[in-house]
Each structure stands twice: as structure tokens, then as C-alpha cells.
Image (cartoon, rainbow, N blue to C red):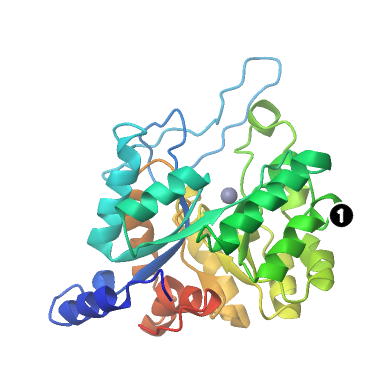
């Protein structure tokens, strides 16, 4: 593909053959990187959540995660301005190409700063669901996808508004993606952080049910959809949807670092062992901590339940097939 630096990948892969650490130098696709840094970043430790109970009679913490010390904390970028540069340096070091999502201007800057490593994505304003606002968004997106070089619709965050992806109000966006053959990534499952009532009052856990896609997939049979966060924790519904729709994929972004490692491994293992090892795609949900990328890759690299081939499928091959990059590594 035009936006994919195959020659550089081939050179790096060849160089890696003589190195000890073969797996980290092979190309990786991260399906889930946010172009802008989230506000209020704090150091954190991957895979150590403890969602503390709260009492609505008292002021509730915004997230309620119990801080757990660790040897290798996730460290936020120094500033929002430094965030893209620090993440791009990690992408270069780890041989990662990423789906980078955000507003068009910011994503275009990423493309300019990290040529060949960015698959650009942008989504619609989730408050633009009718009238002239929606018309303007549809027009903007059509231009972005046909003239602006954008390749992805995402991240679509309807769950935060309590809206089902099959809601007729948002159908025109999925119709556009189907018409233009643009892959769509929709947030599904994780979120709320135990304090949905405080942080995102419209968020509904039930709107993260992967089976909510059945109607939109029936209306748009050629839609290239991936379920972000693999619909965690609704594993049975995810497997039901994957079984019924063989062109639907999922990513492990977010869930891979934000739940206990035993739970993460159990969830991914269940998808793979159910027979869907060719649909699971690596992703970080990078939004704050540049060193999140290496820690997340390491979780797949060290997964005892995966064969070397399955690791490569998750880290690269499945995404390359889904995105039609037609390059096996
Ligand atoms: Zn998300």
C-alpha cells in the first residue's frame, strides 16, 4: 500500500534475523493509537487495577484505581506537545506502524513527522447525529477519505453517548464507510472505569455488547468492521458475532494493559482457542504513556498459550490482512 513503507520493513526484518531479539524487531501493527495526549496523565502500572468500591454519599474519586507500585511504571509523555514525538520514537525503535486516530490536522502532522509509519484515521463528531451538523460531518469525512488520504473511520465512541451502533440515527456514517470501503473501528466494552456516574453519565455498559452490531452488519454486508477492545468483558457475545460474521475482526487495545494479566491472557486465549486466532489484532490504545507500547507488545511476546505463529498473526498478519496491506512477515 502507498502509506506502508515496505522496503524499510524488509530491511529491518532482515537486520533482525541476525539479532538475538528476533520478535521485537519484526514489524508490528498497532491498530489503536490516539493522536492527542489525554489530559491529566499520571504514572501508572500496567495490569494492576483494583476497582475500589465507592459510596455515592461521599465525593467519589474520578477513577477509583488503587495505586499499586511496580518496577516498570507507565510514564506519561513530558507534555502534550512532546507526546507525538515520544510515541513516534518508540514506533521507530520497535518497528511499529500504527493506526493513528484523531482530528485531521493532528493526524496529518503525525503523517508528516513519521512518514510510512502512520495509517491515518478520523471519526465523526458523535454529537452530529442529525440535520446540517450531520450533513457537514458526512461531507468532511467523504473528502477526508477520498481526497485527504485518510484510511480509517475511528475511534467511533458511541457507547460513551449511550448509543447503539445499530441505531438508525448513525446509519449514514456506516453507509459512507461501506460505500468508500473504509475500515471502521468502534469502541466496545471497556470504559466507565467504575465511575461512569461521575466521568461519563451517558456511558452505558450494555451499549458495549458486540451483538449490537448484528443489525448494522445486516444492513451493510460489505462493512469492514473491527471491534475495539474486543468487547471486553462480553466474551460470549463477541464469539457469537465473530462466528456469524467472518469478516469482523477485533483488537486487544486497552484491555491488554488495564486489567490483571491473568484476566487479559484468559480473555485473549479464549478468543484464539475458540478458533478466531486470525481475527485478533494487536493494539495499545496509546493515549498517554509512550512506554505503553513496549509493555503491551511484551504481553503478546511472552504469552505461553500462543505459538510463535499465533503471536505473529496477532502482532502483524491479521491486521495486514484486514487492512489489505498484503504483506506477510
Ligand atoms: Zn476505546
Along the line of sight, the residue nearer the viewer: 189 or 47: 189
Along the horizontal axis of the image, is 195 left or right of 118? right
Q: Residues within 10 Å of mark 1 (few under 14, many from 20)?
A: few
| Residue situated in front as seen by the camera: 14 or 208 | 14
Q: Position of residue 170 (x, y in %)?
A: 79, 52
Above-or-below relation of 310 to 170: below
Quadrant assignment for the N terminus = bottom left
Q: Secondary structure at mark 1?
A: helix
Q: Where, by quadrant of the figure, is residue 115 drawn? A: bottom left
Q: Which residue is mark 1?
A: 168
Q: Residue at x 72, y 76 (%)?
A: 222
Image coordinates of residue 143 in percent, x first then y, are: 61, 56
In this rendering, is residue 260 above or below 196?
A: below
Q: How many numbered circles does the render carry?
A: 1
Instruction: Depth check: give the residue in front, 318 or 73.
Output: 318
Residue at point 87%, 54% (across, down):
168
Estimate the x, y position of residue 55 in percent, counting from the top left: 67, 22
Which residue shows up at 69% across the image and 41% down it?
Answer: 160
Residue located 68% across and 81% down the image: 246
Amino acid at each position: 500500500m502507498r502509506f506502508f513503507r515496505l522496503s524499510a520493513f524488509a530491511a529491518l526484518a532482515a537486520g533482525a534475523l541476525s539479532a538475538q531479539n528476533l520478535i521485537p524487531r519484526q514489524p508490528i501493527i498497532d491498530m489503536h493509537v490516539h493522536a492527542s495526549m489525554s489530559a491529566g496523565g499520571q504514572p501508572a502500572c500496567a495490569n494492576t487495577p483494583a476497582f475500589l468500591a465507592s459510596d455515592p454519599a461521599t465525593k467519589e474519586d474520578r477513577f477509583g484505581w488503587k495505586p499499586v507500585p511496580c518496577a516498570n511504571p507507565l510514564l506519561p509523555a513530558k507534555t502534550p506537545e512532546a507526546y507525538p514525538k515520544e510515541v513516534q520514537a518508540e514506533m521507530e525503535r520497535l518497528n511499529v506502524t500504527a493506526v493513528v486516530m484523531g482530528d485531521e490536522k493532528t493526524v496529518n502532522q503525525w503523517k508528516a513527522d513519521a512518514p510510512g509509519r502512520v495509517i491515518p484515521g478520523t471519526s465523526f463528531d458523535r454529537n452530529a447525529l442529525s440535520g446540517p451538523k450531520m450533513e457537514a460531518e458526512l461531507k468532511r469525512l467523504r473528502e477526508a477519505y477520498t481526497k485527504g488520504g485518510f484510511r480509517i473511520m475511528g475511534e467511533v465512541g458511541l457507547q460513551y453517548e449511550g448509543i447503539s451502533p445499530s441505531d438508525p440515527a448513525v446509519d449514514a456514517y456506516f453507509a459512507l464507510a461501506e460505500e468508500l470501503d473504509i475500515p471502521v473501528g468502534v469502541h466496545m466494552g471497556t470504559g466507565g472505569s467504575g465511575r461512569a456516574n461521575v466521568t461519563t453519565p451517558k456511558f452505558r455498559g450494555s451499549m458495549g455488547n458486540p451483538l449490537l452490531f448484528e443489525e448494522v452488519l445486516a444492513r451493510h454486508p460489505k462493512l469492514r468492521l473491527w471491534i475495539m477492545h474486543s468487547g471486553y468483558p462480553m466474551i460470549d457475545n463477541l464469539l457469537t458475532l465473530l462466528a456469524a460474521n467472518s469478516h469482523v475482526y477485533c483488537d486487544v487495545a486497552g484491555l491488554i494493559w488495564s486489567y490483571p494479566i491473568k484476566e487479559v491472557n484468559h480473555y485473549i486465549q479464549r478468543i484464539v482457542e475458540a478458533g478466531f486466532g486470525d481475527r485478533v489484532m494487536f493494539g495499545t490504545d496509546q493515549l498517554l504513556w509512550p512506554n505503553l507500547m513496549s509493555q503491551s507488545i511484551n504481553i503478546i511476546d511472552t504469552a505461553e498459550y500462543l505459538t510463535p505463529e499465533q503471536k505473529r498473526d496477532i502482532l502483524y498478519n491479521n491486521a495486514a490482512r484486514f487492512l489489505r496491506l498484503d504483506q506477510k512477515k
